[in-house]
């Protein structure tokens, strides 16, 4: 790009962030970044025209100052600064008469609210806590108290002339609609629920509440059900204690219960049965705090507004950080996607796919195919506290461990074979001067023989024993890399015939007890083919190997940041080109971005597997189909090897049926989206020039098929040369046209 193009790009990007931040400032009041919901909230704020205008003025002012002061553009774009300014302006716009003086006050209030937001972001951010609507409360109180000495600001009387305002917006039709909604006979509690919703935007009418409830339902089924749960829990609690729940009293404070329920039940906490239960437990506490604060702040003639909601949510999120053990039943949201559903489905998918993330990637400590001659709880050794261990040997095609008569160690296929580091680490113990035994003899004095112990993490050590005398080429204190050759397989110690003893243990000394710790990705060889194993323990008689990369396949998915990919898409008689760029974000996460559609797909490549972790964008983008087709790809080709995985439901399932799942998600998941890939064809196993993979995505509803896509991936010397997509009885062909 030349300088002019780069400058134009950043200007366009800044404008996009600016207007995106304005939109999200409205929806963020309900923890959302949904554009349709933002439009609904915007419309409701203009039910009082002047309040709506002042609200918009505050949001624009906040955006301008946030850009001028060069604050984090991601936070600006999400509307996290603007929504508090919007609330302050709506409150001032409703309470005071519209005037140029009030416009100045609103601009100053927006600036102060921004400053408070950034300050609280720094203070609470140290504890990974949100600042919620605290900036709104503090700024509004400041200006509300100060206004008592500002006679130029007249108290608004527009509430008396509501019909005039509605007529200005929508004419006689809107006035009649407003009268009809307020005049219909509905259950008292439902009416109070709608009014409580509208009160979040300083509106106190049923029509606003109904519109917001509909918007909430469109944005999130989980948030909608939580709003009902929070409201009715409080409503029943008030009835139980005999407190007043009249519309006039309740509407001003009812939104505390709605916002608390959404925040605790599904936004900052992954939706679950336990999160819903905590909503029921915490809402009465919010009610008690609300009642007490009302009495306290009445002395100063200040409204409590959303203070109880802020107090309980922050307190609950804070105390959760002191838990000593992670619980998937009550899990905090660490990567916020601004939707309870997306948070839930991503979490469920992550738990399913990456439940072993906290394990170190421990690989098999050798090259090629070896077999387990003795596994956990073996028949000879590997007993009691030392039961979690493996003995590995090499067999030939006839099932023999040795050539000739097998009378000397050199006859054994595994003898003198390289032994490698199972993971990165530091050598903490080495014994290397013990003689190898004659076949059939054992050395009970030096039981473990020549041994290397490597530290891989806290309370995680690997031990490699019975190594060949004087073959060890590392010393205590050396740093080693996974796959690095450390020694040779021998026959030292309590070893009647050459083999490699391998175990994981919690302590760094020879003779330590063992631990049951899984090995990461490896291949198990069967008579009928291959099986991919992930975080499992090889069993006796299993023949296994690490995934040995096929250069053609490995290079095709070796996507490097800065790399550009161009594809030509053929669909019927239409042909067009799509440009992708491989990028990396501030957190060192790699992703592919499509210039045309704006779609992004995050991926990982650990040397054994290339796999996608997250997709964001439209479902008709080519990158989406690439995400589906190459969801998980092995680095090595093994004929007919099949690897399966699960997609996040919200990334694949049809939206209309997903709505039903959304409502039930915290309690029961009846849908599944499966991925499968098959190593179908290789033209020459020793020196391939062509590889073909077949993959599919399949939706299941109550274990019944509900649609699928088929993909064919042809790989050659230039990487992915052809991707054929079969979906809905239609076919697309995608050819690589260039690579930069």
Image: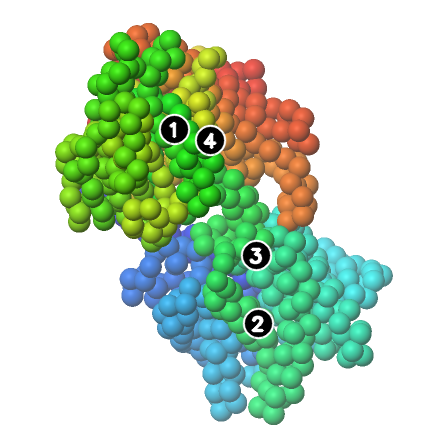
Are the residues tagged 1 and 4 within 8 Å (C-beta)?
A: no
What label sits on residue 330 in the rendered view? 3
Q: Residue at x 63, y 57 (%)?
A: 274
What label sits on residue 379 in the rendered view? 4
Percent coordinates x, y for residue 250 in the rendering: 71, 74
Query: Going from the N terminus, do you reach mark 4 or mark 3 first?
Result: 3
For label 2, the crowd category at 10 Å Cα-Cα, with few meaning under 14, some 14 to 19 and many 20 or more, is: some
Percent coordinates x, y for residue 644 in the rendering: 49, 27
Query: Going from the N terminus, do you reach mark 2 or mark 1 first?
Result: 2
For label 1, the residue is 522
Q: Residue at x 52, y 89 (%)?
A: 148
Label 3 residue SS: helix
Q: Quadrant of the N terminus?
A: top left
Q: Which color scheme does this rendered protein use? A: rainbow
Which tag is nearer the camera, tag 4 or tag 3?
4
Are the residues tagged 3 and 1 within 8 Å (C-beta)?
A: no
* Side of 736 where 527 appears, left or right: right
Q: Is residue 214 visible?
A: yes
Which tag is nearer the camera, tag 3 or tag 2?
3
What label sits on residue 312 in the rendered view? 2
């Amino acid at each position: 790009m030349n300088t002019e193009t780069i400058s134009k790009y950043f200007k366009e990007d800044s404008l996009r962030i600016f207007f995106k931040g304005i939109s999200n400032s409205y929806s963020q009041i309900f923890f959302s970044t949904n554009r349709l919901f933002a439009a609904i909230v915007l419309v409701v704020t203009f039910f009082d025209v002047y309040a709506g205008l002042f609200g918009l003025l505050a949001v624009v002012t906040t955006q301008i100052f946030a850009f001028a002061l060069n604050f984090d553009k991601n936070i600006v774009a999400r509307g996290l600064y603007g929504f508090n300014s919007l609330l302050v302006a709506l409150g001032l716009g409703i309470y005071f008469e519209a005037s140029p003086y009030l416009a100045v006050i609103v601009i100053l209030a927006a600036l102060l609210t921004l400053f408070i937001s950034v300050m609280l972001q720094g203070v609470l951010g140290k504890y990974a806590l949100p600042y919620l609507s605290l900036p709104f409360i503090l700024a509004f109180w400041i200006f509300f108290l100060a206004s008592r000495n500002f006679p130029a600001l007249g108290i608004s009387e527009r509430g008396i002339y509501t019909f005039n305002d509605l007529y200005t917006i929508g004419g006689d039709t809107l006035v009649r609609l407003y009268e009809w909604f307020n005049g219909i006979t509905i259950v008292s509690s439902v009416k109070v629920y709608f009014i409580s919703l509208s009160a979040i935007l300083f509106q106190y009418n049923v029509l606003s509440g109904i519109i917001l409830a509909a918007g909430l339902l469109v944005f999130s089924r989980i948030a909608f059900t939580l709003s009902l749960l929070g409201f009715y829990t409080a409503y029943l609690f008030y009835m139980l204690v005999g407190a007043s729940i009249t519309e006039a009293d309740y509407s001003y404070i009812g939104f505390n219960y709605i916002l608390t329920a959404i925040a605790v039940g599904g936004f900052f906490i992954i939706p679950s049965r336990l999160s819903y239960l905590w909503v029921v437990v915490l809402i009465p506490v919010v009610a008690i705090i609300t009642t007490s604060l009302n009495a306290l702040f009445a002395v100063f003639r200040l409204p409590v507004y959303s203070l109880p909601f802020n107090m309980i949510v922050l307190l609950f999120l804070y105390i959760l950080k002191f838990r000593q053990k992670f619980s998937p039943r009550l899990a905090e949201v660490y990567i916020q996607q601004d939707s309870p559903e997306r948070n839930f489905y991503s979490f469920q998918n992550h738990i399913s796919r990456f439940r072993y993330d906290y394990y170190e990637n421990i690989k098999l400590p050798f090259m090629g195919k070896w077999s387990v001659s003795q596994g956990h709880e073996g028949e000879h050794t590997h007993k009691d506290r030392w039961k979690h261990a493996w003995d590995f040997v090499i067999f030939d095609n006839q099932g023999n461990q040795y050539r000739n008569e097998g009378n000397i160690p050199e006859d054994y296929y595994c003898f003198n074979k390289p032994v490698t580091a199972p993971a990165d680490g530091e050598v903490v113990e080495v014994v290397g001067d013990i003689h190898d035994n004659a076949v059939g003899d054992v050395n009970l004095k030096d039981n473990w023989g020549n041994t290397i112990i490597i530290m891989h993490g806290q309370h995680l050590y690997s031990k490699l024993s019975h190594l060949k005398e004087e073959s060890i080429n590392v010393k205590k204190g050396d740093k080693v890399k996974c796959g690095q050759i450390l020694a040779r397989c021998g026959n030292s110690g309590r070893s009647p015939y050459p083999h490699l003893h391998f175990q994981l243990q919690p302590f760094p000394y020879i003779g330590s007890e063992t631990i049951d710790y899984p090995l990461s990705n490896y291949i198990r060889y069967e008579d009928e083919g291959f099986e991919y194993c992930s975080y499992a323990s090889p069993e006796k008689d299993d023949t296994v190997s690490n995934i040995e990369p096929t250069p053609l396949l490995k290079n095709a998915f070796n996507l490097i940041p800065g790399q550009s990919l161009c594809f030509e898409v053929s669909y019927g008689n239409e042909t067009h080109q799509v440009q992708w760029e491989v990028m990396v974000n501030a957190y060192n996460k790699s992703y592919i971005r499509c210039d045309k559609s704006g779609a992004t797909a995050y991926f990982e490549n650990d040397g054994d597997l290339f796999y996608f972790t997250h997709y964001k964008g439209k479902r008709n983008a080519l990158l989406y189909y690439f995400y589906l087709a190459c969801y998980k790809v092995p680095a090595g080709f093994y004929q007919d090897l099949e690897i399966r995985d699960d997609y996040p439901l919200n990334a694949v399932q049809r939206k209309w049926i997903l709505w039903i799942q959304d409502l039930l998600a915290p309690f029961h998941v009846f849908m599944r989206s499966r991925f499968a890939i098959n190593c179908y064809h290789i033209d020459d196993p020793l020196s391939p020039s062509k590889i073909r993979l077949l993959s599919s995505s399949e939706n299941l509803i109550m274990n019944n098929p509900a649609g699928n896509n088929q993909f064919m991936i042809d790989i050659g010397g230039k990487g992915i040369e052809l991707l054929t997509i079969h979906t809905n009885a239609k076919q697309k062909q995608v050819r690589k046209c260039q690579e930069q």
